[in-house]
Amino acid sequence: RIVLHKSITENCQNECSFLIVGGGISGVSCVETINFLAPGEKIIILTESSLIKSVTNLVQLGKYAQRFDVKEIVAENFAKPNIHVITDELKSINSKEKIAKTAKGLIIKYGLACICTGARPKIIHNKNVEEFVIGIRDTDSVKEFQKRIKTSKKFVLIGNGGIASEIIYEIQNIQIEWLIKDNHMSSTFIDPGASKFFESRLRNKDYTKTNQSVVKRMRYMEERKTSEEVRKGAALGPDWHRLIDMSGNLNSNPENIKIHYGVEVKTITRVEEEEFLICVELMNGEKILCDFVVSATGVEPYKTFNFEDYVDFKCSDDGGIIVDAFMRSSVDSIYAAGDVCTAGWEHSKFWHQMRLWTQARQMGMMAGKSMIADYNKEEIYQDFCFELFSHVTKLYGYQVVLLGRYNGQGLNDDYELLFRITPDKEYIKFVLKNGRLVGALLIGETGLEETCENLILNQIDLTPYGDDILNPNIDIEDYFD
Ligand code: FAD
């Protein structure tokens, strides 16, 4: 239990009850929650970036699934009489004295602190070519990317997650060679079937206009995987590409995109070719020449500060600060939320961690609630949003809703998939275990979000309904009302 002396907030400008480090979505959500629950309590938000992120236009698609936009605010405009914004970098913490020091030499005394410093792209580094390999992360990196596509003929894109998928769909008038280590596109979010559904959109070819729904059931044998298997601003978020011109100077042509499936990069080197400066060599020996490389191969938690008092965070293998269900780290009075942390509690059956906006917001809010409970010496419970994984995003122009174990995560060989596919309109996948819904992938405006959430959480036996559960002529929302 933390005992805070209210007087500390009165004596010094840099003393506060709550210190939040990071102006990304998790930090800002944490500050907003604290300010809502304890209005007037002194909060300091310490952030390297002069712009901070805030959630806007929140649309509730179900009880769990939410769609929202993110707006950028000049950090100073976020200040209130009790919310002090400091644009500086956290350098060190003395957790016993509860003192934080910044790069500019500022000393901040806090009662409780929350680390929300995000993550950085894992960029494939090769000596001598660093300036030709870029990651997409914040506004500055996007500006750099924009500059390069205007002056280049071809780039190589490495990665198969959300960012690579957005780039491949949004960029025009430049040649792209896309290197994917899996055998289908966008594997972080979708299965091979959905990838085919999107391919026509990507290639801009209408492979059918019939809009006839197809319902298919199949037993799915999950492939067991083998064991082998820097910047200043906050991470960009949904729709980051909408506000900027993402076109190069070549003619638009679907053939500008070449996808290499099942490949891995061996080296990236400089070459003295007349046309191109960089050569990407693949493990299979193939060589690809290009002007530059975009490395979109995931992120790693980011924390550059250290402790003065010889403690340290307990961290996971991926470098994330391990937190419990209340977002408490292993260091006294320090919480963590968002991309920088690793969810160290026992997860509910239908939830798993992914470093996404949705979870940055949920964790930031949970940290805020927990810090206030600590402050008031109250007991709280973990928020219900951690019961069910839900994420809403846009891929290739479609709304994509992911619920529970949407890719059969952790189910081994033992599940069934039921599909309803209406080309160019919707792609619905139900993941069933023992006749019960455990996950869903909903592409397009399906309106099934809340029904699926309920079916997953209630674990109703759907065996009696057979394939009719996805029959387009039956309104399953009505069915389970
Ligand atoms: P961040 O947003 O990274 O914020 C970290 C903050 O900490 C920053 O303000 C930074 O300046 C500050 N900071 C760092 N170190 C220090 C320090 N030592 N001292 C002071 N301040 C510090 N997710 C989705 O859900 N949907 C998407 O469509 C999506 N698209 C994305 C597209 C791109 C290009 C990228 C890069 C990410 C995308 N993500 C998306 C992921 C999403 O952006 C992150 O999960 C989310 O932003 C994490 O929020 P955060 O607050 O934890 O960290």
Image: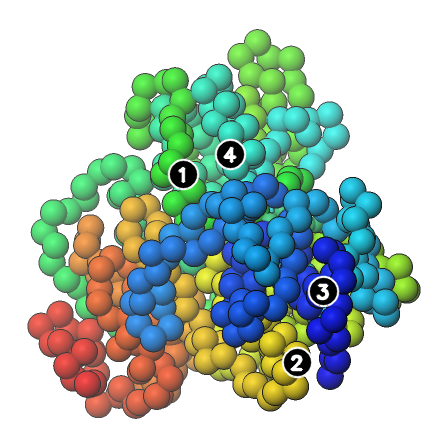
Q: Disc 1 on helix, strand or loop?
A: loop
Q: How far apart are marks 3 and 2 (CA)?
A: 21 Å
Does any atom of ligand 1 lie closer than 8 Å to the CB of label 4?
yes
First in sequence: mark 4 vs mark 1 = 4
Judge depth for marks 2 and 1 and give the one in front.
2
Q: For the residue labelled by badge 3, is the local secondary structure a helix, a strand or a loop?
A: helix
What numbered label is drawn on residue 142?
A: 4
Q: Earlier in the sequence, mark 3 or mark 4?
A: 3
Look at the picture and state if 380 lies above or below 292: below
Q: Nearer the viewer, mark 2 or mark 4?
A: 2
| Whole-number angstrom distance, CA of label 2 to CA of label 1 | 40 Å
Q: Which of marks 3 and 1 is nearer the N terminus?
A: 3
> Whole-percent x and y of residue 385?
45, 75
Amino acid under disc 4: Val
Disc 1 marks which amino acid? His
The residue beneath circle 2 is 374
The answer to whether residue 450 is seen in the rendering is yes
Q: Which residue is drawn at 49% across and 70% down?
A: 36
Q: Are marks 4 and 1 in contact (CB under 8 Å)?
A: yes
Q: Mark 3 or mark 2, which is nearer to you?
A: 3
Cα gap from disc 4 to disc 1, whole angstroms: 9 Å
Kind of residue at badge 3: Glu
Q: Earlier in the sequence, mark 2 or mark 4?
A: 4
Look at mark 3 in the image and give the residue it sits on.
10
Residue 175 position by quadrant:
top left
Which disc is residue 241 wearing? 1
Disc 2 from disc 4: Cα separation: 40 Å
- Determine whether label 2 and label 1 are within 8 Å by CB: no
